[in-house]
Amino acid sequence: MNHWRFTYRKHLPFLFFILFYALLGLINLTTLPVAWTDEVMNLDPAIQFDKFGHFYSKLWPNPGAERVFASYPPLIELWHILWLKITNPTVFNIRLPFILFHLGTLTILYLLLNTSIKSNYLSLLFVLLFALDKSVFELSRSVRVEVLILLLISLYYFLQTKSNNPYLQGLIAGLLLIAHLYTLPIVLAWLIKTCVKNKFKYNFKFGIMFIIPTLFSLWFINFNVSEIISQLGLQATKHTPQSTGFFYVLRDSFYGRFFPYYKEQPFMWLVYLGILFLYIQLLIKQRNSIKSVLLQGSLLELLLLGITIFGAMSAQYRYLPAFLLIGIITFASEIKLNNKIFNVLLTIVVLNGFLSFTARHITAIYQRSERLPEPILVFLDKNIPQNKKTLILGESIGEYYAATHKLCDYGLDYHPIHFKYSDYENVYYLSKDSISYLGCKKIGIYKTIQNKIPSIITKFAKGGTYSNTILWKVESEMEFNRISQPYLTY
């Protein structure tokens, strides 16, 4: 009992942080952020399956998605389908598992670091560095697949330290394979190291579990490989570097990826560059035994992931959390515990992240009445007929309304390629734009009490709200086409 108390007290700072992180996360779960594009796009195929028993999505613009959905790796969709079997599609219900998954990732990371560097203080600092990174905490409730990716990565490394179970590790690797295209280098590295290090019996058990998620995913869409090649191939081309010329690709990937997005956390740019520098330094130092070095720890996956993200992917910040997580796992143990200068610098970076993190949450609390989804859904219920076939275009909250109304569809206004005006009795447009639309009738404006945010907070955080959302009824096909013009000229 005394030993347990000693251990418990030793980890109190981390427990306090994780409870603080969880409390803020739950308080602002439905309000930070408000419903947004990626959230509802990832959710829509599962919504259609739940409503109609058919796996498709008119919301995605890729040709063929309206027949069978194959525009995105299936892990996030399979999760949503499973979850919707036991819960209703409200903003809170859909986001709740993701904040819990994220808390699991932070806890596993702390346990991993505590094992490798033997310092509760430094382990906590690295966890804070990761958790308070802007891209990490924004994605933690984004309903994007990154939350699942981070959990799977941390679980895989945790299992390596606790057991050598080929079934579990094979299943995790298999799930990561169907998570996203940029996770393929990580999975490839795991496969290489598994084949090199283990005997046939282990590899066979690993391989059996590894292929199950892929086989299930193919079965789920009737092994329609041609649609995967067509839709996923088209989607992948949208996420490759858009710049031409080596210098511009380099600039966008190593600078444009971070700024202006990280303008309130400029030190994080140095952290990412620091990981790259440490990696290059290690390879130079161990150049005579690079092969053996790469097979140790997580160096090979960090190398392949880094080449993929910074060399072959578009300059999106959302790919960075996986790189940061593996980078911390790889290099945290390399830091000398008595390096006071490093500890001070790390503390400064963490404090900067804390300011940004808390500012976002304070803003969400100040604007709570403007961000809550339930009142605007009630507003839509009062103003949209329930017994007519209806299409809602525009603001993403429309997806959550359509999810609970079988006669209602939702589409993004800038690519309604799969929607026809003539297919619906009523077409509505949710807009934050106050300009008048000649072919539209203004039904109403959703207004709430707006609280003034302290100016010092707005320097670190700005966020969208539902306040002043206008509901228009689109009364002509010509106006419908005009609203969707941004896609038609894409």
Image: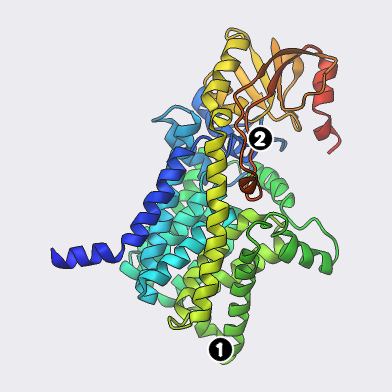
Please, what is the three-letter code of the amino acid marked with disc 1?
Gln
* Residue topped by disc 2: 65
Residue depicted at x 76% and y 17%: 421
Outermost residue on the left side: it is 1
Q: Residue 245 — which label? A: none
Q: Position of residue 313 (x, y in %)?
A: 70, 59
Viewer-proximal residue, 106 or 390?
Answer: 106
Viewer-proximal residue, 89 or 20?
Answer: 20
Q: CA distance from mark 1 to mark 2?
A: 48 Å
Give the side of residue 46 with respect to residue 306, left or right.
left
Give the side of residue 119 with respect to residue 222, left or right.
left
- Quadrant of res 24: top left
SS state under label 1: loop
Quarter of the image with the C terminus in it: top right
Residue 142 visible to the viewer: no
Viewer-proximal residue, 456 or 142?
Answer: 456
- Quadrant of res 3: bottom left
User: Is 81 drawn above or below residue 185 in the view shown?
Assistant: above
Answer few, some or many: residues within 10 Å of disc 1's Cα (few below 14, many 20 plus, some between 14 and 19). Answer: some
Give the side of residue 209 with respect to residue 54, left or right.
left
User: Is 317 drawn above or below residue 414 in the view shown?
Assistant: below
* Residue topped by disc 1: 286
Please, what is the three-letter code of the amino acid marked with disc 2?
Ala
Viewer-proximal residue, 85 or 40?
Answer: 40
SS state under label 2: loop
Residue depicted at x 44% and y 33%: 93
Residue depicted at x 38% and y 58%: 107
